[in-house]
Image (spheres, rainbow, N blue to C red):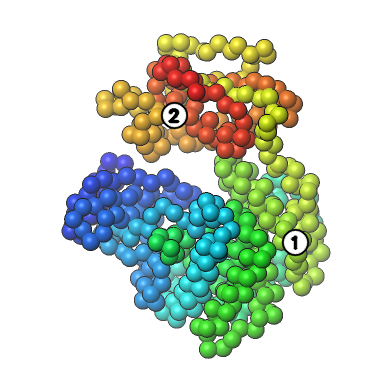
Amino acid sequence: MTDIKAAITELFQKNIKGEIISLEQLPQSGSDRMYFRIQIAGASFTTCIATYNTNVKENDTFLYFTKTFLKTNAPVPHIYAVNEEHTIYLQEDFGNESLLNVLEQQGTTQQVFHLYKKSVKALAALQMKADALLDYNNCITSKEFGKSAILNDLLYFKYYFLDTLKVPYDKEALIEDFEMLSNYLSLTGQKYFMFRDFQGRNIMVKNEEVFFIDYQGGMKGALQYDVASLLWQAKADLNEQWKNELFEYYMDCLDEISPENIERVSFRNQYKGFVLIRLLQVLGAYGFRGLFERKAHFLSSIPLALKNLQNFIKVNSIDLHLPEFNRLLNMVGGEEMAERFYIRKADDQTPLVIQINSFSFLQRGYPADDSSHGGGFVFDCRGILNPGRIESYKTQTGRDKAVIDYIEQETKMTDFLSGVFTTVDIAVEDYIARGFDKLTVNFGCTGGRHRSVYAADAMARHLRNKYNVKLKVSHLEQNIHE
């Protein structure tokens, strides 16, 4: 990490007139890219974002797309500098607030609706105007979202959701239906630039304007796919009125740009197909990350994706004869499947209280359990790299920012906790269902100061957010009881 920050600093000093006040890593999302925010004095801008990514091809695609999009006045970041190796670049900072954040904070207000209208209008303009300038040979993988790409999304859903859950189906019949659906959708005449992941997290809001990020996976494809991704994002859970009005407005925007108005009946029909493809692709992704890799965040997102699919099939259908596919859709979107992923949350009548402790193996040993039934968990954090070995961290704890940054950026704590969350969740759900009143979760390390404190707090956040359960948190070596 020190080497990366040094390389970022060197790139900044060579290209930007100004002084770095601070350089802090931002939380990592689903990709391997690392982002840093630079606070600046003496420059024409006060912050910028440094991106570090060893996938040079991905970087080159992003930089090429950005350069091209800016020629159309699209709302994308300006690039300030790129290092010789094309592993680091400095870009415009749009802040931390995404369109999804705004929706979650404000709800379905007219102001939020207006931001969605701005987003689909800017989307339509970028898709059509940039297409004429782009050389799609610069795409990361496929140049076009055609039949093979559509079929791959369907197979992704099959492998990582249906097969992982051992859902029974007629393999030959399903593949035939996949072939027919991918043929139908690949014949669309409106093919322009396609973001591939156009959703509320990748639309930033600053000063009531919208800006686009994370479009390096783009290619040539159907216009409908991106607007389907935005309007049917599971986490956003937009109501039907908003979806319909925004889709109609999107078509109006296309007509304003294109010399030939789109044929709306067929455009709407194919839009439904791309909504379905997107919903299944998301389920496949959640299946891979959650069911296959056992990552807690993605497992908890599956119910939202299933609800989204259920809402879609209630009011929409594809005008094709797809018997096995439709049978599976009704099964996956049904109540029985939803029940498999139902998260049982605590309410006011739930007696369960979860006691979470951090402690020192050397000073205390295993904490005593004063419950009537005993049991619970003890997790040993000593396999995680110890921040306490660094002189400046010795007097700090797992609640101090410098230690938190070190643990999150330099150790395998995230992987460790992913498995811990999955294990503890099984007990929590069972205890809530059976009316038990006590569960203890302990985290120990050498001194009970850094790793165990961080892990205990992370466990508390996870259980509070997922189950709304009553918690008591004690950091025993610091004599902190909350």
Measured from the top left, where is residue 465 in percent x and y?
Answer: 57, 38
Q: Which residue is drawn at 63% across and 78% down?
A: 188
Q: Is mark 2 on a helix, strand or loop?
A: helix
Whether 3 is drawn above or below 142: the answer is above
Q: Is residue 290 left or right of residue 80?
A: right
Give the residue at mark 2. Answer: 454
Whether 17 is drawn above or below 37: the answer is below
Counting residues from the start of the chain, the first of labels 2 and 1 encountered is: 1
Q: Which residue is drawn at 54% across and 52% down?
A: 104
Task: Calculate the distance from the C-alpha at mark 2 to the C-alpha at mark 1.
Answer: 43 Å
Marker disc for residue 313: 1
Total labels: the figure holds 2
Three-letter code, disc 1: Ile
Whether 1 is drawn above or below 452: the answer is below
Discs 2, 1 touching: Cβ within 8 Å: no
Q: Is residue 25 left or right of residue 313?
A: left
